Amino acid sequence: MKLYEFEGKRLLARHGIQVPTGIVVKAGDDHTPEHDIAVVKAQVLCGGRGKAGGIKVANSKKQIKEHITALQDIAIKGEKPSCILVEEKLEIKKEYYLSIAYDTRHRTPVVIASAQGGVDIGDKEVLIEPIDLAEEFTKEKATDILRKADFDDAEKISTILLHLYHCFTTNDCRVAEINPLIKTRDGRLIAADAKIVVDDDAQNRHPEFDFPPRSASGRKLTPYELAAKQIDANDHRGTAGGSFYDLDGDIAILASGGGASLTCVDALMGYGGKPANYVEYSGNPPREKVKQLAKVTLSKPNIKGCWVVGGTANFTDIYETLGGFMDALDELKEKPTYPIVIRRAGPRDAEAFEMIKKRAAMRGYDITLFSNDVPMTVTAKTVLEKAR
């Protein structure tokens, strides 16, 4: 989960890293500015906020209010700000970059440091230093890393790096970044921005986290997305719902396999169809989880067709998973009258297809079955033709 800047700064502050004084303003708040000069920041999860006009400097209380109003109405890369952060304006003497992140090449966390922080950090010289998890990460090690990165005040800033490491490990972060870390004219070291990503799978270890659920783009989750995510919350047998995205189309989709799922959605849209959702289930989820996922997917209004699609499974029990789908059809409040196209193959698929044919005949479901002798993408055209 990506955290907003103000959320990330709260984590940093808990670990002894100084952040600017400020206040979070939400839509409808009657905010009276504390400062005459302030930095007004839109709170979004996407990058490039500054260049997109999401950060403004105000030189009066009136201008602060004007900037708050203006930023509440903008969209940055399609993302509306969740709220606005109003902070003290810092007198900058020097900017640095500090980050700790997991690196798949080294298979360990790494320190990423640059004596030149701020915008366009990718164009600046950075040091990447692996952290040996078998040894304690000490102030001395932090100082050595910063000296290698040519920090001019390595020993003092090493305390910040040490605090950042503790924040990273204590909160099960995947990324903990300060950019820029500012040295002010009066000698303070302050985290002027924070980009924190916490591991979704570790949140059960952190009851103190009060971060509202959000999509990767920052928007609030819809009721269908929230319901789908709960399916995997306390049951790790396969996945069914963790990657559910609510869309505005009318063809419900239950897909299997990440790459195949995306290819199938592309095919559906290529034929002129509009998906009602994107979701993938995999890893041999139990029958009950597939049933719950299907009920969430098919509970949306105005569905014109349903497409259950996937490649040839290696170890997913096709009979049990498709059995869960059929159980969901039987439990829907309204019997589905729209066409259902199923393209699936794998263990016990012949047994599954016989079961589906019998239950469809008994219940009056319009179901068309395809095995792996028909390409997945071709069945996208079938479901659209039948829906139309």
Image (cartoon, grey):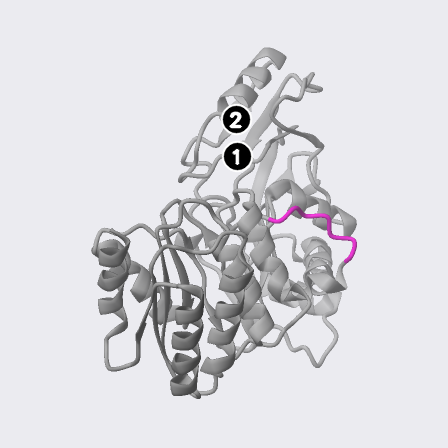
Residue closer to the observer: 101 or 28: 28
Q: CA distance from mark 2 to mark 1?
A: 6 Å
Q: Secondary structure at mark 1?
A: loop
Which amino acid type is marked by label 2? Gln
Magenta stretch? 207-213
Q: Residue at x 58, y 69 (%)?
A: 289
Which sits in the foreground, 190 or 251? 251
Q: Against 269, is 183 above or below?
A: above
Position of 250 compared to 136: left or right? left
Q: Are marks 2 and 1 in contact (CB under 8 Å)?
A: yes
In the picture, measured across the screen, residue 121 lies left or right of residue 383, that is: right
- Secondary element at image label 2: helix
Question: Where is 216 relative to 290, above or below?
Answer: above
For the view shown, which residue lies furthest in the top direction?
62
- Residue 147 position, x and y percent, is 60, 62
Which disc is residue 72 wearing?
2
Crowdedness near tag 2: few (<14), some (14–19) or many (≥20) residues, C-alpha within 10 Å: many
The residue carrying pointer 1 sits among few (fewer than 14), some (14 to 19) or many (20 or more) residues within 10 Å by Cα, namely: many
In the image, is residue 282 part of the stretch drawn in magenta?
no
Q: Say which residue label 1 marks.
A: 81
Residue 58 x %, y %: 56, 20
Measured as percent of width and height from the top left, residue 105 is found at: 48, 77
> How many numbered marks appear?
2
Above or below: residue 229 compared with residue 53:
below
Q: Which residue is depicted at the point 22% across and 51% down?
A: 272
For the N terminus, which image quadrant? bottom right
